[in-house]
């Protein structure tokens, strides 16, 4: 009688909307790692990523009654986390005197220590590359590449037009290809 993960998550969210704090705690437990991963890939700062994820869950709890189920709960939650993270990046960059223009990469199965080392280097290169992207491109790339959300889901998550989302992703990928060629990255 076990329900698949998403259906079970939706049931927990429905209970949480009705004030069930235990159900929301379970939602937090299940979604904490993906939200921290999202915020970390955006900030590259572990402590900030955890703080932003926690702030996102507090905001989600406070706004939970406004969730209507028109999009996936995950997309709604990522939108909260993304907005908090983009605001954090703007403030951080302003404080550092940098332009506000602006993770965790899942490892692949490796057979040898050399392959593992190359994969680790590639993951670090991609994360470093992401830091060079404008904030909106970084967010779209993050959601598409790491979370594998559809462009439509990303549009809902970011509140941007579908064409804008596709353009941001296309530009990020174009830049990634150029940097990979220039630096001679191997996979």
Image (cartoon, grey):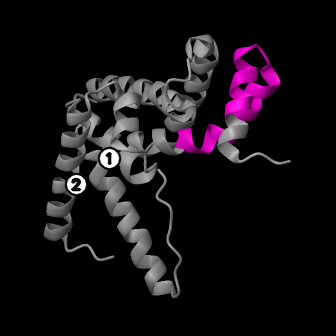
Q: Decide: few, some or many residues near mark 2? Use Cα within 10 Å; few <14, some 14-19, many ≥20.
A: some
Quadrant location of residue 9? Answer: top right
Query: Of the residues under marks 2 and 1, which one precedes in the sequence?
Result: 1
Q: Looking at the image, can residue 36 be seen? A: yes
Q: Decide: few, some or many residues near mark 1? Use Cα within 10 Å; few <14, some 14-19, many ≥20.
A: many
Q: From the viewer's side, name the closer residue of 131 and 170.
A: 170
Considering the numbered disc 1 on the image, is that residue within a helix, a strand or a loop? Answer: helix
Say which mark, if any, is on residue 173: 2
- Residue 102 vertical placement versus 4 (above, below): above
- The magenta stretch is 10-36
Left or right of 13? Residue 112 is left
Say which mark, if any, is on residue 161: none
- Identify which residue is drawn at 37% across, 23% down: 87
Q: Position of residue 3 (x, y in %)?
A: 76, 45
The Cα–Cα distance between marks 2 and 1, rounded to whole angstroms, is 8 Å
Q: Position of residue 4 (x, y in %)?
A: 71, 48
Q: Magenta stretch: dominant SS?
A: helix
Quadrant location of residue 31? Answer: top right
> Mark 1 — residue?
141
- Identify which residue is drawn at 64% across, 18% down: 61
């Amino acid at each position: 009688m076990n329900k698949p993960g998403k259906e079970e998550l939706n049931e927990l969210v429905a209970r949480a909307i009705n004030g069930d704090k235990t159900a929301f705690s379970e939602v937090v437990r299940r979604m904490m790692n993906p939200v921290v991963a999202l915020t970390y890939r955006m900030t590259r700062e572990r402590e900030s990523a955890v703080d932003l994820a926690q702030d996102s869950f507090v905001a989600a709890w406070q706004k939970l009654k406004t969730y209507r189920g028109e999009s996936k709960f995950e997309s709604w939650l990522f939108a909260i986390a993304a907005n908090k993270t983009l605001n954090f990046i703007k403030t951080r960059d302003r404080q550092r005197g940098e332009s506000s223009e602006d993770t965790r990469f899942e490892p692949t199965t490796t057979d040898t220590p050399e392959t593992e080392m190359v994969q680790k280097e590639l993951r670090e290169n991609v994360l470093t590359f992401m830091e060079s992207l404008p904030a909106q491109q970084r967010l779209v790339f993050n959601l598409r590449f790491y979370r594998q959300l559809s462009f439509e889901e990303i549009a809902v998550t970011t509140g941007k037009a579908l064409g804008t989302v596709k353009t941001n992703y296309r530009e990020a990928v174009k830049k990634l290809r150029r940097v990979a060629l220039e630096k001679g990255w191997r996979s």
